[in-house]
Image (spheres, rainbow, N blue to C red):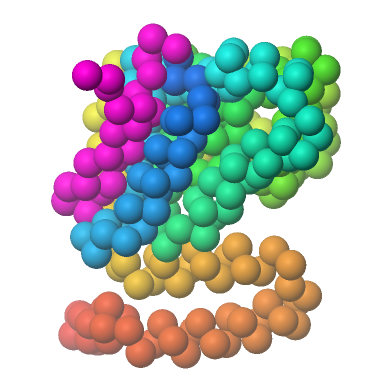
Amino acid sequence: MTEPKVLLEINAGVARITLNRPDKRNALSGELISALKNAVAEAARDPQCRVVLLTGAGADFCSGADLAGLEKTSTASVLDNMADARVMAELFLAMRNHPHPIVAAVQGRALAGGCGLATACDIILAAESAQFGYPEVNIGFVPAMVMAILRRSVSEKAAFELVVTGQAVSAARARELGLIHHVYSDDRFAAEVETYVKHLASRSASAVMLSKRLLYQMDSMSFEAALEAGVEVNAIARMTEDCKRGVERFLKK
C-alpha cells in the first residue's frame, strides 16, 4: 500500500501537516501539491483548528520541485506550463487566505519551491542547521510566484540577491534578513516548536483570525483605506465573545 504523500493530524487546536516523501527529500510532485492543498483546506474547515503546523518528514523540510516534474516542463507547451504553475499559485493563495496562522517548522534544507513553501507560511521556525535558498537561477529558471511573497517578507535588495545569486543561506542569516522568525538549536528544535505552536493556539482564535485577514488585506490598500478597514475590524473585534471576556477579566484585575 502506497504511503500518503501528506499526513494530517488535528489535535489540541493544532493541525499538523507533514510532507511525507522523506526518500525524495519531500520534493514537490503534482500528487504532493494536490494532497497539500486538500490538507490546508481541511484544516480551514475543522472547527477545532487554531494553528496549522507544516513540517517535512525525515532530514529535510522540502528540496523543491520533483525531478520528474522538471523534466516534463521542458517538453510541455506554454499553456500547459502555465496551468502547472497556477496549481502552486493557488496553494500559496489558499495559505495566505487561510483563517488560521500557518507555521513552518524547517529542519534540513528548504530550497527552491520548498523555500517558497516555507516563505508562504505566516511564521517560520528553523533549526540551527537549516538552510534556505532559491537556486532556480542555476538552471536558468525563476522563483517567479514566490517573489510576490518574498518581497513582502524581506527588503527589496535582500530579495534581489537571494533570487539572482541562487546561494543558500544559513538559518542565522535568514533570520538577519527577516526571512524567518526564530532559530533554535537542533537538539531543542522539536521541543521549542511544540511550545511555540501550543502558545499560539492558546491565543484568541477570533482575534488572530481577524488580525491575519486585515494585515494581508492591507497589501493593496491606500493609507486611508487601510485605516477605514481597521475601523471596521476594530468594531467587529469588540463584539466577539473573546474580546468581551478579555475586557471583563482585565477590568476585574
Which image quadrant is residue 64 in?
Answer: top right
Picture coordinates of residue 203 (x, y %)?
A: 30, 62
The verdict on residue 113 being magenta is no
Give the residue at x 52% y 30%: 30
Q: Is residue 125 left or right of residue 253?
A: right
Picture coordinates of residue 113 (x, y %)?
A: 60, 28
The part of the chain drawn in magenta is 1-24
Q: Is residue 25 left or right of residue 228?
A: left
Residue 162 at least partly seen: no
Q: Nearer the viewer, residue 100 or 173?
A: 100
For the image, the number of numbered tags is: 0
Q: Nearer the viewer, residue 166 or 42?
A: 42
Q: Nearer the viewer, residue 57 or 196?
A: 57
Q: Point out the image quarter for the C terminus.
A: bottom left
Seen from this angle, which residue lies furthest top? Answer: 23
Give the residue at x 67% y 14%: 71
Q: Is residue 35 left or right of residue 225?
A: left
Question: As displayed, is residue 78 above or below residue 184?
Answer: below
Picture coordinates of residue 241 (x, y %)?
A: 26, 83
Question: As displayed, is residue 183 above or below residue 63?
Answer: below
Give the residue at x 78% y 13%: 139
Which image quadrant is residue 247 in?
Answer: bottom left
Question: As displayed, is residue 211 above or below residue 67?
Answer: below
Residue 15 at least partly seen: yes
The verdict on residue 18 being magenta is yes
Q: Point out the image quarter for the N terminus.
A: top left
Give the residue at x 32% y 53%: 43
Picture coordinates of residue 149 (x, y %)?
A: 66, 46
